[in-house]
Image (spheres, coloured by chain):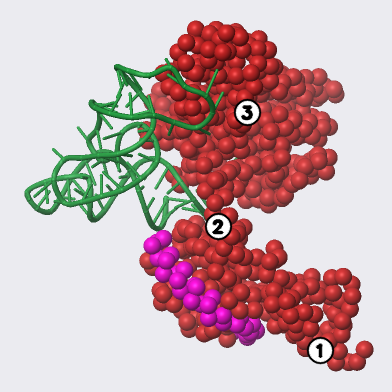
Chain colours: A red, B green
Amino acid sequence: MSSNNVTVTMPDNSTREYMQGTTGTGIAEDISKSLAKQAVAVKINGKLCDMSLSIEQDCSIEIIKRDSEEGLELIRHDAAHVMAQAVQNIFPGTQVTIGPAIENGFYYDFARNEPFSTEDFAAIEKEMHKIVERGDVFVREEWDRKEAIAYFKDKGEMYKAELIEDLPEDEVISVYRQGDWVDLCRGPHLPTTKHVGTAFKLLKVAGAYWRGDSNNAMLSRIYGTAWRDEKELKAYLTQIEEAEKRDHRKLGNEMDLFHFQDEAPGQVFWHDKGWTIYTELMSYMRRKVKSKGYQEINTPQMLDSRFWQASGHWDKYRENMFIIENAETDNPAALKPMSCPGGAQVYKAHLRSYRELPLRMAEFGRVFRKEASGARHGLMRVQAFTQDDAHIFCTHDQLEDEVVAMCDLIKEVYTDLGMAESITVHFATRPEQRIGSEEDWDRAENALRKVLDRIDMKWVINEGDGAFYAPKLDFVLEDAIGRQWQCGTVQVDMNMPRRMTLEYVGEDGERHVPHMVHRAILGSVERFLGVMTEHYAGKFPLWLAPVQCVVATVTGKADEYASEVYEALKAAGIRAELDIRNEKINYKVREHSVQKVPALFVVGAREADEKTVAIRRLGSDAQSVVGLDEAVDALKKEARAPY
RNA sequence: GCUGCUGUAGCUCAGUGGUAGAGCGCGUCAUUGGUAAUGACGAGGUCGGGAGUUCAAUUCUCCCCAGCAGCACCA
């Protein structure tokens, strides 16, 4: 190998020789014209780089095409840059900050005295198309740190200057030029702005804090989506529309499940149908935990502030508590935001022996939490809700097995509810605001780490996101449009037992402090039902469906028989409705389908004569005529709850 | 809490400086129809709340409340 040649290894392990200083573009062109045309970046030794980067040493390379996943991410990243240039062209004096690619698109945060409005989108998009059409080459330059800071300061780009100042000393300061526009960026980029294509669309404006800190200035963020071609863009926009139809707030209204009103922000008015689902789910949970050796308790909703001082909530959580004047005692009281301190009192009601441990106490407690006005969100984030809470008091030796058993129980329940596929576990470690000793936090976090090794579930770490008293495993689900909601949770608490002076008498006759594990399976019943509604698009499993079967008549002549069918269903414990309205069968079928009723028994003169029903199931237009008794039996069997 | 947007009939929404309209739903009547909307007629609104500008405010301005999207928060 001559000294000014380099050997590059292709993904198939074949090698090629090139002159030192060749580029991704050079290699792509050498391999084939069509490849060169599709190439947008190059991976050198696994690192994504510009096509124009000169290659000085032997390496392995992979040409990244525009239609690959990585290509798509570059399109989105560059769309953000193009948007930033467009915005600065149209609105001089706007400062640019950061603008990354995100899932399905991109955003860019701008600092401008006047915020943007969606009415500005047309003009910005038009300018973006111009920039793309022009096909400016993205040119990478590496600048001296001081000069870069001076340059951006001079341009009035204070945020960019701050970003550079905060970069580590040894970091290369790279900027990219596109035409006459320059932006600080790590790169890499597409070869030219033309490669961005035209399949992008600006979607929304929103405020966002500089560096995600609410103490900082609020910037103006513009979100957009970008795809490889118009077809993908259109598919995405359609998908969003479809997802919006599954919104639990919309379905809750349409299906007459619940409502909200101004006088009770963040609190639910449950209607009969919604409450039916709610109580069915609760009954299931009660059967479930009873079978796992839990007792069930219930504790007060309103407790004296001194109680919350002892628990630590008064210090760390008061902002989120509803506080009530209490003239009789001079002390305010507060609605409970959590059930744990109350549960601890039940534990303390007796002197406990190690023989009683582990002691598993479930409490379906209604808790109240004052939420920031912008945080409330349908059933997902309310101010009054029921937690399917439980507290397990155990010895240190029992801890790990107990926590594993809880995780197994959570998995079991989610499987029964058809939600198991959607879980992600978040391991949330000690937060800045916390109580207790570092040793206790170490022990608690280590216990959870061991548990994670033993349960077969995918998990991610969520540094610093633990509760103020304990680290936790959160079981997170997603709503229709991909927002994440914490549902189940398991928290290993070494603090509360000490603060609330819990003890048990050990085998040695001495008093010891038990461990306390907090756990919720559904989390908030309200939130869980919100997620579930979106998951099933309102088509709940038969055992949860508020109306399981409607008996609908084709003609008034069948009214009497229809009542007979209806009574048979009721007698079998089916939640049934009778529809003998003076309407055509088409009308009834449509209405009950829209209402997501799982089973429709249609009866007319024929069925009345033959003592049958014509069954139509939700989601299918097939019909089957079945004898009445048989139909009722089958539905009864199918409607049984999972446990 | 912050930024932007929204609030009109039970629901979805149109509209206007001179106290309002559609579709669906609801009621009545006719129709007895076989698997996703039968027809006609009718009832129904303090235009989120308060203040201001104006001869006149649902419409313009300000404040408050609630909701929507995002940010921050989420024990």
Residues tagged by mark 3 and mark 2 found on one chain of the structure:
yes
Residue displayed at 48% across by 38% down: A250
The residue at which mark 1 appears reads as: A20
Tag 3: residue type? Ala
Nearer the viewer's eye, disc 1 or disc 2?
Answer: 2
Answer few, some or many: residues within 10 Å of disc 3's Cα (few below 14, many 20 plus, some between 14 and 19): few
Answer left or right for A150 relative to A428: left
Q: Is residue A124 magenta?
A: yes
Answer few, some or many: residues within 10 Å of disc 1's Cα (few below 14, many 20 plus, some between 14 and 19): some
Picture disc at residue A197: none
Residue displayed at 72% across by 21% down: A643
Residues tagged by mark 3 and mark 1 found on one chain of the structure:
yes
Answer left or right for B44 relative to A427: left
**Please, what is the dominant secondary structure of the magenta stretch?**
helix
Q: Tell which subunit mark 3 falls on.
A: A
Region rendered in magenta? A117-146
Is B54 rendered above or below residue A109? above
Q: Tell which subunit mark 1 falls on.
A: A
Earlier sequence position, callout 3 versus callout 2: 2
Q: Quadrant of the N terminus of chain A?
A: bottom right
The residue at which mark 2 appears reads as: A234
Disc 3 to disc 1, C-alpha distance: 69 Å
Q: Nearer the viewer, residue A47 or A598?
A: A598
Is A341 rendered above or below residue A15? above
The residue at which mark 3 appears reads as: A622
Residue displayed at 81% across by 39% down: A455
Tag 2: residue type? Lys
Image quadrant where residue A373 sits = top left
Earlier sequence position, callout 3 versus callout 1: 1
